[in-house]
Image: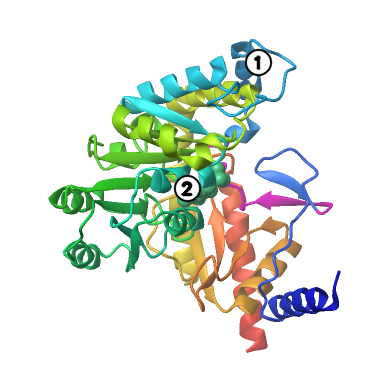
């Protein structure tokens, strides 16, 4: 490598480390679950998005094997539009569509790719695209790749959105938002958004990565939870790697919208379809998640969220207004977030420090992800460990 390349990369890495922004990859050597072995140490896991605890379910792999006809075969061998669209993919799409009550569902290999396609396939030059400021990075990248005029509005601020929407535009309008925000845990108010978007004859795209499976009757997500109908001008993006404990993602909506995404979504067309077995696994996860197993998990989760919030508030920790399993503890500086992360790790708890650019400067936090796989005792012992972090800071100050 040339000296100039070496110097550039070495210097950038050094700065990142100095700013407390270096990202490392903890190595898991156990199966996923509420307790995991990480870098050789057993920890209680508050870092996963396995909200329903399905990752540990013994029924899930059994059910998946029963549904899968092509045992032992791995790859899909092509894109969905060539030779890669297999029966398990097709059945999964139909079952997801039935579950949500939509005309059509399109399966993707990841939520990142789905979020690129939802925007790039539909938007054209001259269109107006509005995003919540805290939208997930994959949505932001979709906006950057689209040819629309792109603006962001203040987080969850419907008056700010209304002002944006009042601007004249020659083209069509799309509004894109996380349903439940991935690093804050709060949710959008769909009723208000739907009426604002309808006034402009716009499309609304809601990323339900953290709400499908978790919220609403049968885990049908934020629309069910807030008792709103998702009409033909709504697209919903779901991921299969979180509450579904599988992998992949999907977009749900009207036939007209979904067919257009399948025609023009480059991140749909130019990538290999996920392994068919993965789709069978997701079909099994859907059955559990929409049924009694999911119902029980959602009730348990509500209980754990209440236990955590009450305990954390009693300690005076800085929480955000979240009623979802995403419960951030605001700490401010990167150094403080890293120090708490390290201290908790020593005590046997894994809470990831979330730092810029994932969150705004000065709002570094620990992101607590609760799961129905946790026990009340595990939450209580976490609260004890958090209290110890506070005491230690008090001594240092
Ligand atoms: C995780 C996540 C994604 C990306 O989904 P993957 O399947 O992991 O690529 C998209 N949006 C949000 C809000 C997410 O949290």
Label of residue 86 in the image: none
Residue 33 located left or right of residue 133: right
Magenta residues span 39-53
In the rendered picture of this protein, how many numbered marks are placed on residues?
2
Q: Quadrant of residue 280?
A: top right
Residue at (32, 34) in percent of width and height: 257
Residue nearest the observer in this picture, 115 or 62: 115
Residue 37: horizontal and vertical position, in percent? 78, 47
Q: Mark 1 sits on what residue?
A: 65
Residue at (40, 33) in percent of width and height: 219
Residue 214: horizontal and vertical position, in percent? 43, 39
Q: Is residue 299 visible?
A: no
Q: CA distance from mark 1 to mark 2?
A: 32 Å
Q: Mark 2 sits on what residue?
A: 116
Q: Is residue 266 above or below residue 343?
A: above
Residue nearest the observer in this picture, 42 or 365: 365
Residue 310 located left or right of residue 224: right
Q: Helix or strand or loop: what does disc 2 sit on?
A: helix
């Amino acid at each position: 490598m040339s000296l100039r390349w070496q110097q550039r990369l070495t210097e950038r890495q050094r700065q990142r480390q100095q700013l407390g922004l270096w990202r490392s990859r903890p190595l898991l050597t156990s199966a996923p679950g509420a307790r995991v072995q990480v870098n050789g140490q057993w920890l209680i896991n508050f870092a996963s998005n396995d909200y329903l605890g399905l990752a540990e379910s013994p029924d899930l792999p059994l059910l998946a094997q029963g549904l899968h006809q092509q045992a032992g075969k791995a790859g899909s061998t092509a894109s969905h539009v060539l030779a890669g669209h297999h029966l398990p993919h097709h059945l999964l799409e139909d079952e997801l569509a039935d579950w949500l009550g939509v005309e059509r569902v399109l399966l993707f290999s990841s939520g990142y790719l789905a979020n690129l396609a939802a925007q790039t396939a539909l938007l054209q030059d001259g269109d107006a695209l509005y995003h919540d400021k805290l939208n997930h990075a994959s949505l932001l990248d979709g906006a950057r790749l689209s040819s629309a005029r792109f603006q962001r509005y203040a987080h969850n601020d419907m008056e700010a959105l209304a002002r944006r929407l009042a601007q004249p535009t020659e083209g069509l309008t799309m509004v894109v938002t996380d349903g439940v925000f991935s690093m804050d845990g709060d949710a959008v108010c769909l009723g208000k958004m739907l009426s604002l978007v309808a006034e402009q004859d716009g499309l609304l795209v809601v990323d339900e990565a953290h709400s499908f499976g978790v919220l609403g009757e049968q885990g049908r997500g934020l629309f069910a939870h807030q008792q709103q109908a998702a009409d033909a001008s709504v697209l919903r993006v779901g991921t299969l790697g979180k509450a579904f404990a599988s992998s992949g993602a999907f977009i749900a909506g009207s036939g007209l919208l979904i067919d257009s995404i399948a025609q023009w979504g480059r991140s749909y067309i130019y990538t290999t379809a996920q392994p068919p077995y993965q789709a069978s696994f997701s079909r099994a996860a859907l059955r559990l998640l929409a049924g009694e197993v999911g119902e029980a998990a959602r009730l348990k989760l509500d209980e754990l969220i209440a236990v955590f919030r009450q305990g954390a508030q009693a300690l005076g920790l800085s929480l955000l207004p979240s009623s979802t399993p995403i419960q951030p503890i605001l700490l401010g500086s990167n150094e403080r977030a890293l120090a708490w992360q390290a201290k908790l790790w020593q005590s046997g708890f894994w809470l990831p420090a979330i730092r810029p650019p994932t969150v705004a400067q000065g709002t570094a936090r620990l992101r607590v992800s609760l799961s129905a796989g946790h026990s009340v005792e595990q939450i209580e012992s976490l609260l004890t460990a958090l209290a110890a972090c506070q005491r230690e800071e008090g001594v240092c100050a």
